[in-house]
Image (cartoon, helix red, strand yellow):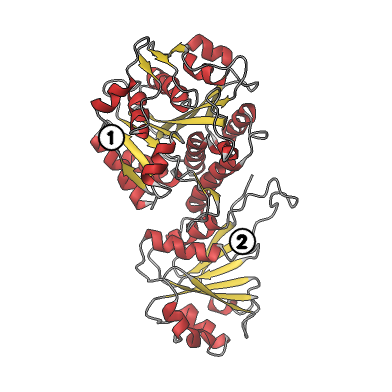
Amino acid sequence: MTIPATLQVTQLDLDAIATFNGRVAVIVSNDGKLNAPAQRLNRLTKGAVKRFVESAAFEKLEEGCAQELAFPFGLAAEALLIVKLQRSAQTQMARKAGAAIGAALDKKDVLVLSGYLKRASDVALGVLLKAYAFTDHKSEGPATETPTVTFAVTKPEEIDAAGVTALAEGVFFTRDLVSEPANVLTTTEFANRLKDLEGLGVEVEVLEEADLEVLGMRTLLAVGQGSRSPSKVVVMQWKGGQDEAPLALVGKGVVFDTGGISIKPAVGMEDMTMDMGGAGVVSGVMKTLALRKAAANVVGLVGIVENMPDGNAIRPGDVIKTMKGDTVEIINTDAEGRMVLCDVMWYAQDRFEPRGMIDLATLTGAIVVGLGHENAGVFSNNNAFCNAFLKSAKTESEGAWRMPLGQAYDDQLKSHIADMKNVGTRAGGSITAAQYLQRFVKDGTPWIHLDIAGVASVKSATDLAPKGATGWGVLALNRLVDDLAAAGEA
């Protein structure tokens, strides 16, 4: 388990700057004016700060980036980071500036001197998120000790250290799950890690294959029947609200996806350890809500399976009956995520009658073709609900783009031997996948489908994450929970 750096907030003490060991970071506005901490650093370093700020190098330095001065004269610190950031910087830029500090932590304690800054909490979150590294399977092993990040500010009450840490822990939980190889994160191990959330006050229930058979989750079970790992559904309930119906989050948890009998090409198949990304995001959100004791009712449900080719695996041409009762003709066994989700979505509505339902899945390559790695695809049957999510995602700088739904796309799913096919044509593949899922949304249930295939894991570092798992969605959904609670509507 990857643990974020320890975040603490203290009252600014200018006299303590000179003797701080580790690293010191100071934020300087774009106009080069030095605040009180920067002025003290300038005196201690015999004018080095001012010389840099007045140089062409500072002028060329992009906002949100940092310049390191190694072993600065007059300081006990081994490095001084000068971070360029406007006092009125917005969320995304503030987090980017924090990430510049986080990228330079190097397992050393850091003292951050932000001066007066409107979004110091966002800077702090950026520090923690960027400092993530998944090392569980390297010789060094996971870090047993974490550096301490100390924000020395004039108004310590303006930074909620516990809240920022809760967000980082939720994102890290998601990143860890998505990063794990399938021989480690088996279906059983995944469920066990979610059971551990009981220690935070989450009610966790694991439905085994026998339970799923009784419930009639035949399409979910069909996906996993070629694997030696048992299929499961994990139900996580956070009851922090009053008597209101919960918001339901449903995640696809395919711990490894070979494509089944419709086997994938060998090139790139190793990436299919991340095909449980939707379930990973749901898990991270539930952890964050519990850590910060969110005043809301939320239920997270994840369908955990493995899609393998085997003599017992489902075949193209098979017909399976869903929990809802509709029959599905299997055209492609690699379109397995929607078969997992449809049963879990129906169960979520039957059991919890949620005020709204959001499913998340690394569902289609088509969404990557359409939106790349910058935005998740957003599909919805309810404008108000969808707009609330898009607002939350924008506030958290997590890319999301609404996609269309329509009868013409749905018509592609018609089957001559069953109620529907599990795929349409190649054209509009992410949309027909969403249309399939919409068939399992009850009338009156506000619903959002998030296709996160392009954003759950990336090949190069982003502003807030290294290469690999991003944890996309934890921040946006956490904010949405609060926004809906405040509005009293779904």
Residue 69: x, y in percent? 58, 79
Task: Indicate the secondary structure of the residue bearing disc 1.
Answer: loop
Q: Residue furthest bottom?
A: 46
Which quadrant holds the N terminus?
Answer: top right
Residue 121: x, y in percent? 44, 59
Instruction: Give the residue type at disc 1.
Output: Glu
Which quadrant holds the C terminus?
Answer: top left
Q: Which residue is mark 1?
A: 489
Disc on the earlier residue, 2 or 1: 2
Which quadrant of the figure has residue 324? top left
Residue 4: x, y in percent? 59, 53
Residue sitting nearer the eye, 319 or 51: 319
- In the rendered view, would you say 299 is above or below 371? above
Residue positioned 61% across, 61% down in the render: 148
Residue positioned 37% across, 9% down in the render: 417
Residue sitting nearer the eye, 290 or 218: 218
Q: Which residue is mark 2?
A: 148
Which quadrant of the figure has residue 436? top left
Residue 262 shows in the view = yes
Residue 243 shows in the view = no
Quote the CA–CA distance across marks 2 and 1. Answer: 39 Å
Residue sitting nearer the eye, 403 or 120: 403
Residue 203: x, y in percent? 52, 28
Instruction: Give the residue type at disc 2.
Output: Thr
- In the rendered view, would you say 164 is above or below 210? below
Tag 1: Cα neighbours inside 10 Å, few (<14), some, or many (≥20)?
A: few
- In the rendered view, would you say 336 is above or below 84? above
Residue 430 relative to residue 14: left or right: left
